[in-house]
Each structure stands twice: as structure tokens, then as C-alpha cells.
Image: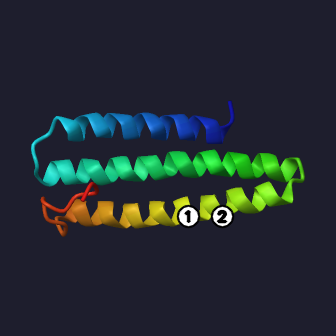
Amino acid sequence: MSVLGVTALAAAAAAALAWLVVSFSAPGRRRVVVEWLGTLALYVALLAFFLKLCRDAWQDERTLALVAFGLLAAVFASGGVLSAVRLVQAIRGRISANAGATH
């Protein structure tokens, strides 16, 4: 399995684990941090998946697929950056406990 495949699986597992923790946690600062961590993990999993598809399209010289998957990879990369910023803000306590990633 490639590095992108391992990254996607690990990030998907982290997102699922974060989802379970959030589901059974009371509202609070810890829950908000775990929400943003899970959101970031989901974006990383999707980004790794679409980067793998971009690599495959590049190798097969499929231009339309490369453009489509590259656009989706860019969207998920920007979402990942935003989630990382919000995660840092949540860790620093700059996000209220009522305004998590699910709101």
C-alpha cells in the first residue's frame, strides 16, 4: 500500500474515533477540540484519496480526470488548512464551547 493509502486509512480511522468521542462527550472545550481534530482528519483522508486519484490520472495521461481530481484536492486542501487554523484556535481557547465544528 502506498503512503497516500496509509495516510487516508489512518486519517479516516482518526476521524471515526473522534466522531465516537464527540458523540459520547458532554459539551465543552475538550469536545470542541476533538470536533476540530476529527474535521481535520476527515479533510486529510479526503485529500490523500484525491491526491492518489490525481497521481493515477497523471500516470494514465487522463487530462480531464487530472483536472477534476486536482480541483477536488485543492478544495479539500483549503478546507484542511481552515480546519487546522480552527483547531489551533480551539486549543488556545479562542472558540467558545458552544461553537464547535458541527455548528
Q: Can you tell which mark lies on residue 75? A: 1
Does residue 35 appear to the left or right of 93 in the view shown?
Answer: right
Q: Please, what secondary structure does the residue beneath circle 1 have?
A: helix
Residue 96 occupies quadrant: bottom left
Give the labeled residue for mark 2: 71
Seen as rendered, the residue at the extreme top is 1
- Residue 20 higher or lower than 33, as above or below: above
Q: Please, what secondary structure does the residue beneath circle 2 have?
A: helix
- The front one of 62 and 45 is 62
Q: Position of residue 18 (x, y in %)?
A: 31, 40
Q: Position of residue 80 (x, y in %)?
A: 46, 60
Does residue 71 appear to the left or right of 24 in the view shown?
Answer: right
Q: Are marks 1 and 2 in contact (CB under 8 Å)?
A: yes
**Which residue: 23% across, 61% down?**
90
Disc 1 residue type (three-letter): Val
Cα–Cα gap, marks 1 and 2: 6 Å
**Which residue: 60% across, 64% down?**
74
> Considering the image in quadrants, where does the N terminus appear?
top right
Q: Can you tell which mark lies on residue 43? A: none
Residue 6 occupies quadrant: top right
Q: Residues within 10 Å of mark 1 (few under 14, many from 20)?
A: some
- Residue 95 higher or lower than 23, as above or below: below
Q: In the rendered picture of this protein, how many numbered marks are placed on residues? A: 2
**Which residue: 79% across, 45% down?**
56
**Visual colour scheme:** rainbow
- The front one of 27 and 84 is 27
Does residue 99 appear to the left or right of 20 in the view shown?
Answer: left
Seen as rendered, the residue at the extreme bottom is 94
Disc 2 residue type (three-letter): Leu
